[in-house]
Amino acid sequence: MAISLNRHYLKTFIDDDALFSMQEEVSEAVSFLYENKANAAGNDRHGWLTLPEDYDKEEFSRIKAAAAKIREDSDVLVVIGIGGSYLGARAAIEFVTSKNYNLLPGTKTKIFFLGNSISPTEINEVLAICKTCDFSVNVISKSGTTTEPAIAFRVFKKLLEAKYDKAEAVGRIYVTTDRAHGTLKALSDEEGYRQFVVPDDVGGRYSVLTAVGLLPIAAAGIDIDALMSGAADAMRRYTSTSLKENPCYQYAAIRNLLYRAGKKVEMMVAYEPDYTLMNEWFKQLFGESEGKDGKGIYPASAIYSTDLHSLGQYVQQGERILFETVVTFARPKTDLMIEEDGKNADGLNFLAGKPLSYVNRKAFEATVIAHTDGGVPNIVLEADTMDAFTLGELFYFLEKACAVSGYLLGVNPFDQPGVESYKKNMFALLGKPGYEDMTAQLLKRIEE
Ligand code: PA5
């Protein structure tokens, strides 16, 4: 089943005429990915577009072999990376298996994600775990120079070298980085670590279907062939330039229409807690791709019905700047029948004989009606189930929609110049060589 876009709950906000009047603009935006690529901003970062078919097959085999080795010799895999070098893999593992992946009875190798914060507490916790078991490290950084993962890698490399002999420690380190540049690449060459490549033409947040995502995902026992097949299916499916026929481009167009109508915040919603990290991946993808030049929809997220008991009030009656995009699944991963109870003390016997997925569906229907009545447009993306194939489809669908949406907005969806500001300030405050000029100015501003 393909991803489809249900516009039923949008009718009162955007009618067919308004949507299809976007055809010309959408065609122009899409042309930046294909025939007009030469004039596109960020055209050196379009590699993700053909990646589901045009990927390095030899490396793909090495990824599977590395994952098998990790599952064989490691109780724990520490995956070190941040942003695009982190979120996709974790989102995939939680989506296909569970947010409780590490606790599942069938889990062979527990996976911990580090280097995505600078919290000493977080690092110390995983260090303590790794001291008592066999572990391996997959350090991921496209630039090979990002501070957060570099610090975490230094710590875990030291523990590996203390725990195992030199050759064994080297054999337990898997590096995913640039083909030629960066400190991590130089260190890997020097030490002889196993290396995997982030292709030059694939930016961090579009890199989940490269070794960046694939190695940790395979190490979790997930079928990466199915993942790539789903993405390849989406790649072939969402190509029609006709807005009427292409739900991926419809999503991009609708987002922009809503933004122009003052809906500045998109709430990505799912009714499955295992979607939580997919929401985080979505926020990075769209936030970094569109939030620039004083423009962009602010990407937010929620898991319902959980967050109906926290954010629901705001969505229903707060400032009317929101729209929601709800991802629904036709089939839950598992289901649970509600049983008859002799006493019926809780008064729930009216639900006896119904599966819990039915109640979850009614929660969705009730909410989407309430929120649209409250002035919140709802886009509904319908997918099959939370498996590797569907995830591949979703990754590709959302990446392509993001690129088209960014071009519609008139920004470069593939750069992130704003991320540098905090980094420069942090380096200056930490006294990194080369930042001396900034240090005094910043210290003065803190003390003022
Ligand atoms: O999307 C991006 O490019 C960023 O979020 C990066 O993935 C993030 O900053 C990490 O960078 P790197 O992989 O170079 O360590």
Image: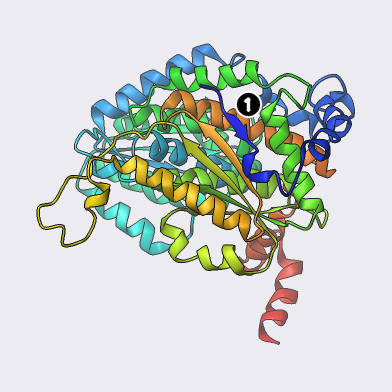
Return the residue found at the far bottom: 448
Return the x and y of residue 289 as percentages of the image width and height: 71, 44
| Residue situated in front as seen by the camera: 315 or 206 | 315
The image shows residue 448, relative to residue 75, as above or below, that is: below
Name the element at disc 1: loop
Identity of the residue drawn at 78% across and 26% down? 33
Q: Which quadrant would residue 166 be assigned to in this image? A: top left
Three-letter code, disc 1:
Pro
| Residue found at x 62% / y 61% | 374
Model colouring: rainbow
Residue found 59% across the figure and 14% down from its top: 53
Q: Is residue 52 above or below residue 14?
A: above
Asked if residue 338 lies left or right of residue 416, the reply is left
Q: How far across and how far down the image is residue 359, in percent?
A: 36, 46
The crowd level at tag 1 (other Cα within 10 Å; few <14, some 14-19, many 20+) is many
Can residue 411 be seen here? The reply is: no
For this view, does 106 lie left or right of residue 322?
A: left
Measuring from the top left, give residue 202's x and y in whole percent.
Answer: 66, 30
Vertical order, 106 against 259 (above or below): above
For mark 1, what is the residue? 199
Q: Quadrant of the C terminus?
A: bottom right
Dot 1 beta carbon under 8 Å from ligand 1:
no
Residue 189 higher or lower than 302, as above or below: above
Q: Residue at x 32, y 47 (%)?
A: 159
Split into quadrants, the picture shows ligand 1 in the one at top right
Q: Quick check: can you spot residue 271?
A: yes
Q: Position of residue 297 (x, y in %)?
A: 72, 52
Question: How many numbered circles are shown?
Answer: 1
Occupied quadrant, residue 136: top left
The answer to whether residue 83 is left or right of residue 43 is: left
Q: Residue furthest left?
A: 342
In this view, the residue farthest toward the front is 350
